[in-house]
Image: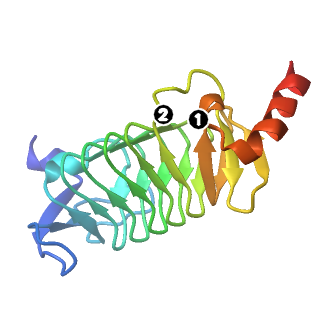
Amino acid sequence: MSDESKKYELVDASDSSSVKKLYRIKALRDFHNVKKGDLGGYVESEHNLSHSGTCWIYEEAHVVGNAKVYEDARIRDKAWIYDDAEVYGTATVRNQACVFGHGKVYDNADVSDHANVYQGAKVFKEARVFGRAKLRFNMKATKNITVIDNNDSVITIADSKMHVYRSKIYDKNDYPKKYRKLLESLDKSNE
């Protein structure tokens, strides 16, 4: 890639929170709400952030390992993207959220507030995952999954606009015993 087509450069400045060599990104041109000369977050290499689109890593956010941010995605507010995770489309990851393993966040999804997306979980379309939610791929899930919050109440049956707040996620074969009767009655009412 020629220097003229690059949108950022790496500034040799590891932060104190990592034992790996990290670089801060610095904008080489104006795009979206980023101005030439603005400092962004931290990466391990140019592999972590695409020079195409308007994707950007802001403030104290980190994208390391084999993780990739591309298209028009935004990483903000001390969020961490690592391992083989991907964030793309117009997705946003912010407020100390983490995406790792083979987690993917894309389309117009929003992950925030200490939430974790990992082990191949996918967050997409208009989905929002926030609070201290932990979303991971479950091999047994074949249809809808149910979201149950920490206050022992059912929030929603998952769909393309799933909203998760301080929740645990279960598939139908994995419901805790205390929820089974309630959830079975909900399933019958939806038939």
Q: Quadrant of the N terminus?
A: top left
| Quarter assignment of residue 97 | bottom left
**Residue 163 percent location from the top left of the image:** 68, 47
Residue at 14% x, 67% y: name it: 22
In the image, taking residue 51 as reference, residue 132 lies left or right, namely right
Residue at 49% x, 68% y: name it: 95
Residue farthest front in this picture: 177
Above or below 155: residue 71: above
Q: Nearer the viewer, residue 20 or 53?
A: 20
What residue does disc 1 label? 125
Q: Nearer the viewer, residue 77 or 72?
A: 77
Q: Quadrant of the C terminus?
A: top right
Regarding mark 2 in the picture, which secondary structure is present there? loop
- Residue 139 visible (yes or no): yes
State the colouring used for the structure image: rainbow
Above or below 115: residue 67: above
In the image, taking residue 120 as reference, residue 94 lies left or right, namely right
Above or below 37: residue 136: above
Mark nearer the viewer, 1 or 2: 2
Counting other residues with Cα less than 10 Å from the Cα at mark 2, is it few (<14), some (14-19), or many (20 or more)?
some
Q: Nearer the viewer, residue 77 or 52?
A: 77
Q: How many marks?
A: 2
Q: Earlier in the sequence, mark 1 or mark 2?
A: 1
- Residue 162 visible (yes or no): no
| Quarter assignment of residue 167 | bottom right
**Residue 108 percent location from the top left of the image:** 56, 42
Regarding mark 1 in the picture, which secondary structure is present there? loop
Residue farthest bottom in this picture: 16
Which numbered disc covers residue 138? 2
